[in-house]
Amino acid sequence: ARLHEERLLDRSVDQAAAAAAIGNLARVVASPTSMLATNGEALFAYRAALPLYHSTFAGIANCAPCRLGHGYTSFAPTVEAHHGYRAVCVSSRPLESEEPWEEIPTGHVLVAGLDASTRLIRIAE
């Protein structure tokens, strides 16, 4: 609420400025937990003391919902690849996947854009 009240998550705010505001607010709270926030154009993930990881998923090679299954006719969809799907996942531990997981360094904010691009911003002490 504080970030919104101070207009620090407005879409017009520079992503680096928003990341710094999130990191600084997390330090004021003085908690070992991480913080996630979004302004609708970017996801901001601040890592405090506890581990935080991220991975970018690009495409789905074998889509389970598209499978031809029990009760379907030959007109039902077959397994399809969705190469255009992209996503950034943030987790407190690396999940089992084919995609590599990267640890977010302590005191950094991961910024993930709408195009699933990511960058790390170090928050000054």
Image: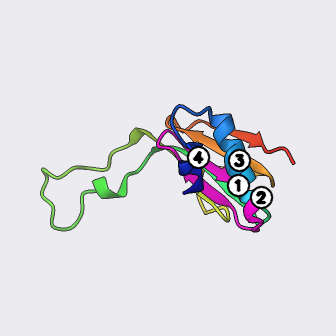
Between tags 3 and 4, which lies in front?
4
Q: Residue at x 41, y 50 (%)?
A: 62
- Give the Cα distance between marks 1 and 4: 12 Å
Give the amino acid type for the residue marked by disc 1 in the picture: Leu
Q: Quadrant of residue 48?
A: bottom right
Q: Which residue is at the front of the view, 78 or 31?
A: 31
Expressed as whole percent of the image width and height from the top left, the position of residue 58 reads 51, 41
Give the amino acid type for the residue marked by disc 4 in the picture: Glu
Q: Secondary structure at mark 1?
A: helix
Name the residue tied to disc 3.
109
Q: Residue at x 72, y 51 (%)?
A: 23
Q: Residue at x 15, y 67 (%)?
A: 71
Give the amino acid type for the residue marked by disc 2 in the picture: Arg
Which circle's residue, 1 or 4, is located before the other in the chain? 4
Expressed as whole percent of the image width and height from the top left, the position of residue 16 reads 68, 35
- Give the Cα distance between marks 2 and 4: 17 Å
Give the amino acid type for the residue marked by disc 3 in the picture: Val
Expressed as whole percent of the image width and height from the top left, the position of residue 14 reads 62, 32
Q: Residue at x 81, y 55 (%)?
A: 106
Q: Are marks 1 and 2 in contact (CB under 8 Å)?
A: yes
Name the residue tied to disc 1.
25
Label 1 crowd (10 A; few <14 / some 14-19 / many >=20): some
Q: Secondary structure at mark 4?
A: loop
Q: Is residue 89 something one can see in this rendering? A: no
Q: Is residue 37 magenta?
A: yes
Which circle's residue, 1 or 3, is located before the other in the chain? 1
